[in-house]
Image (cartoon, helix red, strand yellow):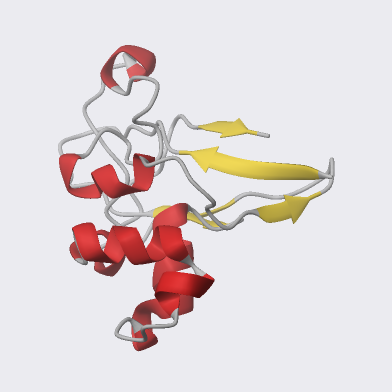
Amino acid sequence: MLFAVVAGALTFAGTAQAHGSVVGPPSRAYHCWEKWGSDHMNPAMAQEDPMCWQAYQANPNTMWNWMSMLQDGLGGQFEARIPNGKLCSNNHPNFESLNKPGPWKTTPVGDNFTIHLYDQASHGADYFKVYV
């Protein structure tokens, strides 16, 4: 069974502020917000979803701003500006807790699946990689 880890090495045209994230299969931040956003004070999260728990403890804003993962102005230098080990945070310091290795929840997918990118401000991602 394959698991999808969607890494957002994304850029946009223009100088607009980037807003959006992959919501299907869910990015790490979106999963944590979707699962725990309305119940983020539940102590059960520490046992049931320890990676979301550590991310909320490190910076709750990581989950509340799950849609701020996209990054503009990379000028085609995706791999140079978003190094290995920083893919899940898209190299944003505010989202560093998403890079931490551990038992993150994954989504099983087959060999034919669809990526749903939520781009709330309609900037239009022109580049992203999918790791399976």
Residue 11 placement (x, y as % from top left) = 33, 32
Q: Which of these two is toward me, 116 or 88?
A: 88
Q: Which of these two is toward me, 92 or 85?
A: 85
Q: Residue at x 52, y 73 (%)?
A: 48
Q: Residue at x 39, y 58 (%)?
A: 29
Q: Residue at x 36, y 54 (%)?
A: 20
The image quadrant that residue 58 belongs to is bottom left
**Placement of the N terminus among the 4 image quadrants:** top right
User: Quick check: can you spot residue 34?
Assistant: no
Residue 84 placement (x, y as % from top left) = 40, 21
Residue 112 placement (x, y as % from top left) = 83, 44
**Placement of the C terminus among the 4 image quadrants:** top right
Q: Residue at x 38, y 15 (%)?
A: 79
| Number of residue marks | 0
Classify residue 86 as left or right of residue 5: left
User: Quick check: can you spot residue 31?
Assistant: yes
Residue 9 placement (x, y as % from top left) = 40, 31
Classify residue 7 as left or right of residue 108: left
Q: Is residue 4 above or below residue 129?
A: below
The image quadrant that residue 43 belongs to is bottom left
Q: Is residue 1 above or below residue 81?
A: below
Q: Is residue 39 above or below residue 95?
A: below
Q: Is residue 115 above or below residue 10?
A: below
Q: Which of these two is toward me, 22 or 124?
A: 22
